[in-house]
Image (cartoon, rainbow, N blue to C red):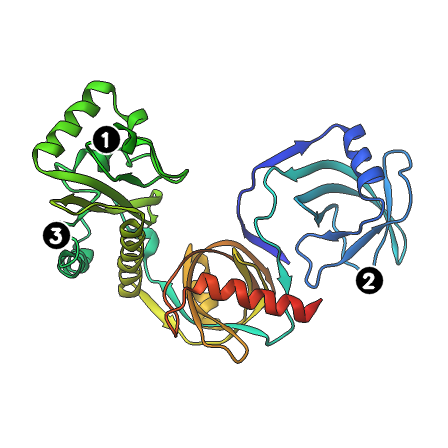
Amino acid sequence: MAIILEKDRDWERITEQDKILYLLNDKLSQSGLFKKGSEPPIEFIPVGPEEDGSFQFAIPENSELNEKVTLYSTLKRQLELDFDFVKLQNPTSVLLRPLEARISKNGRSFPRYVLKNGVVLATNFQVGKNEKNIDHTRSQVGFQIIYKDYEKKLAHEYPGIRIVEFSAKDRPRLTELLNKKDGLILVPDLSRDEAFVPPGEEFLDVRESLDEDELSRLKRELLEQKINSVAVLPMRMETVMGIKPIAFLYYEARGEKRIDSAVFDQLEEASEDILQRIRDASTVTVSAKQRVLNVSEGGIALEITDPELIKHLPTLSWITFDLVFKLQAPMRFHGKICHISQQKDLYQVGVDLEGSALSVGKTNPRTRLKSLIKFVSDQTE
C-alpha cells in the first residue's frame, strides 16, 4: 500500500549499526516483523544471526520487494526499521541490510483488536466541505447564529454565559492566555488563592501566565463585579493555520452560583455540542457502510471503498460517523484522521477518536465503546 498520510510520531532514532544489530539479534530473535504498507501484513521472520551486517528473513513466496524496505513491530511501543535490499536468496528468503531503527517514545494508549469482517461497521459519515478554509482570526459570520442560539439556551441555567469569537475585539483577558497555549481555565472561587491551582493537567495555570501585579488586578476587578468564579473553554477546529480556537465558551458565575467540577463537565458537553452543530452546518452526509478493520478505545482503522468518501479524503482532517457493533445501537463519534494508505481503489484510514456525541439510549459513547470492545476481544481470544 502507498502511504498518503501518516501522523507524526515522537521517535527515538537509532542509526548506530551496533545498536540496530543488538535490537535485531537480541530483542527480535523470537518475534516476526511486518512490511509497512502491506495489506494483509506480510510477515518477515528473522532466520538467523546477522552476517556481515545483513540479515536473512523468511518471506512469503512472490512478495513484492523494493530497494528500500521498512519493517515494523508493535510490542509495548511501535518499532520501525529501514533496510536496504541486498538480494533475494530464493523465492522465500531475502537478505536485508539495516539502515535505521525508530522506537516510539510513547507507548500505545489502548490495546487494538483486529475484527472479523462485518462485526463492526461505520456509516452516516459527515465530511467537511471547506474545513481547511476557516480563518480563526476573522469573524465567522456563518457561525454567529449558532453562537447566539446556544447563548440563549445556556443562559437559563448559566446567566451571563458568553461565546466569544477569537477575532473579537476587547476579549476577556483570560481568553487571551489561550491564544497560543492549549488548555482549559477554571477558577472555582476567586476569593481563595488556592483556587488558582489548576485542578488537572489539562488546565492552564493562570499564575504562570500572568505576573503578580496583573493577577492581583484581574482578581480585584472580577470580585468588584460580584463575580465569584470563572471558566474558559476554547472551541478548537481545523483552520488555515492548523487546529486553533475559533471561539471560547466564557462563563462568569455571580451571586450564589459557583463553577464546580460538575458544572464544568456540563460546560464541556455544551462546547462539544456547539462544535458539532458547526460541523453539521458545514458538512455533507455520506450514508455508505464501511468496514472497521480494527478498534481500540482511542481509535479505529477503516476500510474505505465508497467513491463519494474517497473523493473527499484528500481534503479531510476530521470526520464524524456512526460506529455500529453488530446487533447494537449506533454510537456517534468525531475523530481526527491520522493515517491514510492506498492500494488501487481501496483505502485504509486511521482515525483518532477525539470527541463524541450522545448515542441512542443517552449512554456516554466512550463507556459503551469500552464495554463493547471488551466483548469483541473476549470473542476473538
Does 81 appear above or below 4?
above
Residue that extends furthest to the bottom in the rendered view of this protein: 327
Residue pointed to by mark 2: 62
Q: Looking at the image, which is closer to me, 340 or 302? A: 302
What residue is shown at x 16% (from left), y 53% (from top)?
Answer: 158
Q: Can I make out residue 316 in this image?
A: no
Does 250 appear above or below 365?
above
Instruction: State the CA–CA distance, disc 3 to disc 2.
Output: 69 Å
Q: Quadrant of residue 105?
A: top right
What residue is shown at x 44% (from left), y 57% (from top)?
Answer: 335
User: Quadrant of the image for the N terminus?
Assistant: bottom right
Amino acid of disc 2: Asn
Task: Identify the disc placed on residue 159.
Answer: 3
Q: Quadrant of residue 250?
A: top left
Q: Secondary structure at mark 1?
A: loop
Residue 334 located left or right of residue 212: right
Residue pointed to by mark 1: 192
Counting residues from the start of the chain, the first of labels 2 and 1 encountered is 2
Amino acid of disc 3: Pro
Q: Secondary structure at mark 2?
A: loop
Instruction: State the CA–CA distance, disc 2 to disc 1.
Output: 71 Å
Instruction: State the CA–CA distance, disc 1 to disc 3.
Output: 23 Å
Q: Nearer the viewer, mark 2 or mark 1?
A: 1
Rate crowding at label 3 as few (under 14), some (14 to 19) or many (20 or more) other CA atoms within 10 Å: some
